[in-house]
């Protein structure tokens, strides 16, 4: 039997790999601008940018893991309900990425965050200072994104800062291949292919949600042995 945490990370990696088509549509233009705005030194430029972006994701994942753990402590005895809620969030985001229903327009909070970040992003994009590209990547990692929200929900289920950071770091690393290609090609990735890959990533997000719900069901069953076939006998013997 594979370790559940390792299985989750493998699925998270595949979500990032396939779902990065969504990232191409969201921030591919910025990646292309970064790659071609530094005298053609695409490889080194991308490395700095992606390092900042992945570290930002890891920091967000750590916060989500801490929040999930704290919520579980404060609401002791209902951790299973928290996992159910987060599993449903994952399924909802995954179905939206699959095109199963229309996603509502950006929230006021999301619009406010984006508006606040655009000005410093523009300044960093034009800056030649050391560390500007890493900072630019970090700010880009803070932009509102449904796929990142889904991964943060997954990170919250870990209940641990370290595990949450690892979850988002794995996701961030998995998005690098597609975005690197965008940097080299200047964003000339067929829209139809992006949609297909995004939906494949959505299917995997749904799978993560189903796994989360299944583990919640097992947790509830362990609390009440009668919910498991022969559970009482297993616990007694």
Image (tube, rainbow, N blue to C red):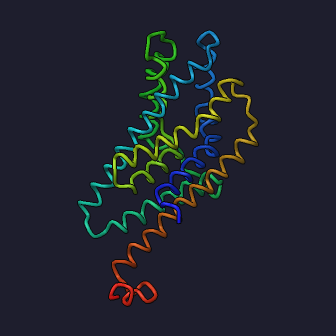
| Location of the C terminus (image quadrant) | bottom left
* Residue in front for this viewpoint, 137 or 167: 167
Q: Residue at x 25, y 60 (%)?
A: 73
* Residue in front for this viewpoint, 137 or 3: 3
Query: From what the image shows, is residue 104 above or below residue 109?
Result: below
Question: Residue 144's spot in the image, x, y percent?
Answer: 48, 39
The mark total stands at: 0
Question: Residue 114's spot in the image, x, y percent?
Answer: 46, 32
Question: Residue 13's spot in the image, x, y percent?
Answer: 56, 47
Task: Describe residue 225's horizontal placement relative to residue 178 as left or right.
Answer: left
Question: Residue 233's spot in the image, x, y percent?
Answer: 38, 90
Task: Describe residue 229's horizontal placement relative to residue 184 as left or right.
Answer: left
Task: Describe residue 207's horizontal placement relative to residue 161 as left or right.
Answer: right
Query: From what the image shows, is residue 131 above or below residue 208?
Result: above
Q: Residue at x 45, y 39 (%)?
A: 110
Q: Where on the picture, by quarter, is residue 29?
A: top right
Q: Residue at x 31, y 50 (%)?
A: 67
């Amino acid at each position: 039997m594979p370790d559940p945490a390792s299985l989750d990370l493998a699925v998270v990696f595949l979500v990032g790999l396939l779902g990065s088509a969504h990232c191409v549509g969201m921030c591919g233009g910025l990646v292309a601008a970064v790659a071609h705005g530094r005298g053609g030194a695409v490889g080194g430029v991308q490395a700095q940018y992606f390092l900042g972006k992945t570290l930002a994701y890891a920091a967000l994942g750590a916060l989500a893991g801490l929040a999930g753990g704290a919520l579980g402590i404060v609401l002791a005895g209902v951790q299973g309900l928290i996992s159910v809620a987060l599993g449903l969030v994952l399924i909802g985001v995954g179905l939206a990425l699959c095109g199963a229903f229309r996603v509502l327009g950006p929230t006021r909070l999301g619009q406010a965050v984006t508006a606040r970040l655009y000005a410093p992003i523009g300044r960093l994009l034009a800056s030649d200072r050391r560390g500007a590209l890493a900072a630019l990547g970090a700010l880009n990692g803070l932009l509102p994104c449904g796929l990142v929200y889904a991964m943060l929900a997954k990170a919250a289920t870990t209940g641990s800062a370290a595990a949450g950071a690892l979850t988002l770091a794995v996701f961030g690393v998995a998005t690098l291949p597609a975005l690197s290609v965008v940097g080299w090609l200047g964003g000339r990735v067929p829209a139809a292919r992006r949609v297909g890959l995004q939906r494949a990533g959505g299917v995997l997000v749904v799978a993560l949600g189903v796994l989360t719900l299944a583990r919640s069901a097992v947790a509830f069953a362990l609390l009440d042995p009668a919910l498991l076939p022969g559970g009482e006998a297993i616990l007694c013997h």
